[in-house]
Amino acid sequence: MLARVIEHWLDSASERGGYEGPFCQALVARRQRIVFRSSHGAMEQGKDIIACDTTGLYHAYQLKQGHLTLPAYREIEPEIIELVEYPLMHPGIPPGAPFVPYLVTNGNLRDPTRLHIIQRNQGWAARGFRPLTVIDRDQLLSIFLETQGDVLPTTPADFAMFFGLYLADSTEPLRKADLATVLASVVAAPESIKKAEIRRVFAAVAVLAGYVLSGFQRQSNHVAAAEGWMLVIARLLSLGESARIYEPAWAPTVQLCEQAWATSVEALAEEALSPASWAARYFGEDIIHGWRVTVTLGYLSALTVYYRMIDSPYPREGDIFTFVTDRLQKREVFYWGESAAPYFFAICQLLSLHGATGMARDLAVNVVSLTARLNGGRVGLGVPDPYYLAEDLLDPTREDELFGEQQTFRGSSFGMRPFVEALARNGWKQTLRRLWPDITRVDYSEYAPDGPTEFYTWRSTKGSLDTRCWGQPQDWTALVAQSNGSAANAPGTLLTERFPQLVVPFFLVHPHRFTAALAHFVEDRLR
Amino acid sequence: MLPDLPKVRRWAAKQAAKTLRRYALEHAPLMAQIGTHHHHEGDRYSFQLHDSGRIQKQTFKTVSAKMVLKTATPQPARSEEMDQQLRQAASEIAKQQSRMLFTTINEAVKATGNAIDARGREFDVAMFHEALRGLWIEFDENEQPILPTIVLHPDTLKAIAPRVKAWEADPAVQTEFAEIIRLKRLEWRARESNRALVG
């Protein structure tokens, strides 16, 4: 059944954002190390992907879409000549290193083209070049099926969920809980993975997700794609926790997913920075606009933070900062519930990085005072906790079913503490002094999962929801000390230890994991 | 299989669950005054008491009730049977919830030393005042007291109802009550003053 899905997916995939990512994962599963992936610029020299196998031999791949008729081949022939004849030019590759050139297509190779390539290969061989190898649709299908192996959804219900995601309207937000469930089901017992299989199993998880996410990528639903890749990374890291010593085997798969996340968010940035993208539409704009702005600003800020953490600032960081401050000044952001808190936190980080500390403070104060007012009052629902996502809260058709009759969020908050402690850490004493009476009316809650594996799960079953109250009175020095000690409580996970640049992207998708400890951890890394 | 509409059935089951909850609240009016916080993850929770700062750790407890529906019962008797079963189940659930609530309250009262031993005496105004003195009373923005809910056995309520009217008319009782409230207001102001960032 999955073979039919892969066939359908292959037939509808474009080379970029279509099958390139899963193809890289399949190469990793075949023990090849990805050395280079082209951004399809002038420097590409016919090579979209360069990989190195375990013997040290390089492989250069040119990826194309559709059937290769002779006229179609002739159109791309200059690139193929570059692929075969131009040497590998990469700082990590020794000059003159031998390599095998491949032409890969998700279509079929027509006979006249095959004959033409055979003739060409004879000529190349005579001139000392390695012959061109063609990987067509059927071979690609075999590669993907072999990679997938038995890494499949476990139960019929999980399969149904997988198909539901594959066929979902890709203009809608990603059904994150469903994808997390499917990803959890494909490797039910991580401890049973054999050492020799680790590389392939990790790649297979990512490839399976790739089938689902390609629809969102094709539709340029960048946020859904980014969220999906982050969920895949979370699942892989969860599996990685029980296979820490084999990190060299599974880390390349995580890195490819990380690249896919960055590619999606960069595409979002490009679109968001173009004024034409923001033209208002007639229906629902009043409901959607604030959410859309907040999510976009949050993701653009997260992209900036991500690149800063890997010491390679994003080239358009300045444009993003201008764009974000402009939208903030126009008061276009919207705090729909505590699942918005990580977006606001990411924006605060961007502002602080650019010295707009007053603006960052004001944003944090707005979150704190709004939460204190609504959750500290005696009436009303309060601010919905981070388990309620915007797509549910803003859906008018779900208004009646979302909350129980006596349900309330008053009295406590998940999202307030990270901002209160950030204000304390940054010395905003008078600001906090003014807010303190209201802050003390709202206790702070945090969920502490039992161990790293529980940390990554969409809904953890083992752990404690801990609620504490603020000091009354609260000593400033003690508060600052508590704020400065928070990072020490950050969970000891692969995410924080090996992939700290993904902490902000992680809690944008998992707002219920946004804690004071992780917030402090991010701040620490950025300063 | 006979033709079926599972979506409609799921909707009906949800409605039944809602009705069950509503009936349960009718049987436990005190519970109806308490807001609920939903837990989405985990197998336990902890919270800090505002007065002592003590941390209490808890696990989740189950409340359940059995419903027996005869598939052979024809309509409209089936709807009536369903309603009756829901009411019975709700009553059982309400009992369990209330028991749980009072157990928790009793434990808390014992722990804080606020328990009053009536030593077999009937409930009287002195006892009420004594209870109030031991309580932490909140005040609204107009400094009006938010008085606690008093839970009494129906027989006790019947017995003291005429006396409550007399207490309300008794100036001495009212003076003492006003004095207690004055002191409680001062305590509350002190607590409110403590909501400060110092140092």
Image (cartoon, rainbow, N blue to C red):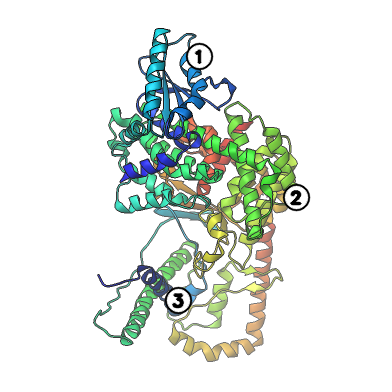
Q: Amino acid at mark 1?
A: Tyr
Left/right placement of residue A262 relative to residue B43 reads: right
Q: Secondary structure at mark 3?
A: helix
Q: Nearer the viewer, residue A10 or B90?
A: A10
Residue A144 lies, with reference to residue B195, above or below; the image says above
Disc nearest the viewer among 2 and 1: 1
Q: Is residue A451 visible?
A: no
- Quadrant containing the C terminus of chain A is top right
Q: Chain of mark 2?
A: A
Q: Residues within 10 Å of mark 2 (few under 14, many from 20)?
A: few
Q: Nearer the viewer, residue B77 or A482?
A: B77
Which x, y percent locates residue A396? 56, 64
Q: Secondary structure at mark 1?
A: loop
Left/right placement of residue B31 relative to residue A520 reads: left
Q: Chain of mark 3?
A: B
Can you tell which mark lies on residue A246? none
Circles 1 and 3 on the same chain: no
Name the residue located 53 percent from the left edge and 65 percent from the top edge: A397
Q: CA distance from mark 3 to mark 2?
A: 45 Å
Name the residue located 46 percent from the left edge and 43 percent from the top edge: A213
Name the residue located 52 percent from the left edge and 52 percent from the top edge: A172
Q: Amino acid at mark 2?
A: Lys
Q: What residue sits right under mark 2 in the picture? A: A330
Q: Chain of mark 1?
A: A
Q: What residue sits right under mark 1 in the picture? A: A86
Q: Secondary structure at mark 2?
A: loop
Which x, y percent locates residue A186? 34, 43
